[in-house]
Image: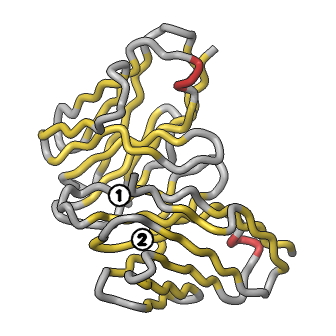
Amino acid sequence: DAMVIQNPRYQVTQFGKPVTLSCSQTLNHNVMYWYQQKSSQAPKLLFHYYDKDFNNEADTPDNFQSRRPNTSFCFLDIRSPGLGDAAMYLCATSTLGGEKLFFGSGTQLSVL
Amino acid sequence: SQQGEEDPQALSIQEGENATMNCSYKTSINNLQWYRQNSGRGLVHLILIRSNEREKHSGRLRVTLDTSKKSSSLLITASRAADTASYFCATENDFGNEKLTFGTGTRLTIIP
């Protein structure tokens, strides 16, 4: 089945140690998104790609970077994780000009 | 901020009863969507209503939209234990920038 896959499901890192989360999709969607969701809060958009065009939200910290090497894959890099970065990170896709988002199962990041 | 506010924050009802959740937002929209999130998982799209629509049905779901009041409601009829989840509204603004902004969510618990 076509889907959005996030790996790993759970990630533990140390304070200040760089970490990369990955997302892949078999839907061939043009738009990919990264959301951060802290406990009992709304998902918050960090950035999104419209094909290869990168769109950063104004309040996304510089500590967060992203790469999209091709249509299928997208990565979230956290250069120096702080305790406040512990959260669920959700990847989503949509079609060009589409409205409905397809989400992966998320990666739960813990920072020790 | 466009972020929606949902009401109530938490709702517990008996199985078989109807559940109603409300969402308010702040700016003009192209559409409003509802998503469901099981604990610790990604979000699943439930239904989309466009700004020129007033009501939409899908199975046991009924969504209404009042653009004059900038509000929407989600009704789940004949609730089941499996409906226990968090429900989020999300709005696509009319700026044409392909972004969804999520509300704060309602945590629904169905008591068997």
Q: Position of residue A57 (x, y in %)?
A: 29, 38
Crowding near the residue tagged with mark 1, few <14, some 14–19, many ≥20 C-alpha atoms within 10 Å? many
Q: Secondary structure at mark 2?
A: strand
Q: Which residue is mark 2?
A: B33
Mark 2 and mark 1: Cα distance apart in space: 9 Å
Query: Residue sitting at 32 percent across and 21 percent down?
Result: A62
Q: What residue lies at 35% left-to-right and 34% top-to-bottom?
A: A59
**What residue do we see at 50% from left, 32% from top?**
A8
Q: Is residue B95 above or below residue A51?
A: below
Task: Please provide percent x and percent y for residue A25.
Answer: 31, 48
Label 1 sits on residue: B100
Expressed as whole percent of the image width and height from the top left, the position of residue B30 reads 27, 72
Left or right: A90, with A64 as reference point: right
Quarter of the image for the N terminus of chain A: give it: bottom left
- How many numbered marks, from 0 up? 2
Toward the viewer: B10 or A80? Answer: B10
Q: Amino acid at mark 2?
A: Gln
Quadrant of the image containing the C terminus of chain A: top right
Crowdedness near tag 2: few (<14), some (14–19) or many (≥20) residues, C-alpha within 10 Å: many
Residue A104 lies, in percent from the top left, at 44, 49
In the image, residue B7 above or below residue B75: above
Residue at x 49% of width, y 66% of height? B89
- Could you say which disc has been placed on residue A112 in the image? none
Q: Chain of mark 2?
A: B
Three-letter code, disc 1: Leu
Q: Secondary structure at mark 1?
A: strand
Q: Chain of mark 1?
A: B
| Vertical relation: B76 (above or below) A12 | below
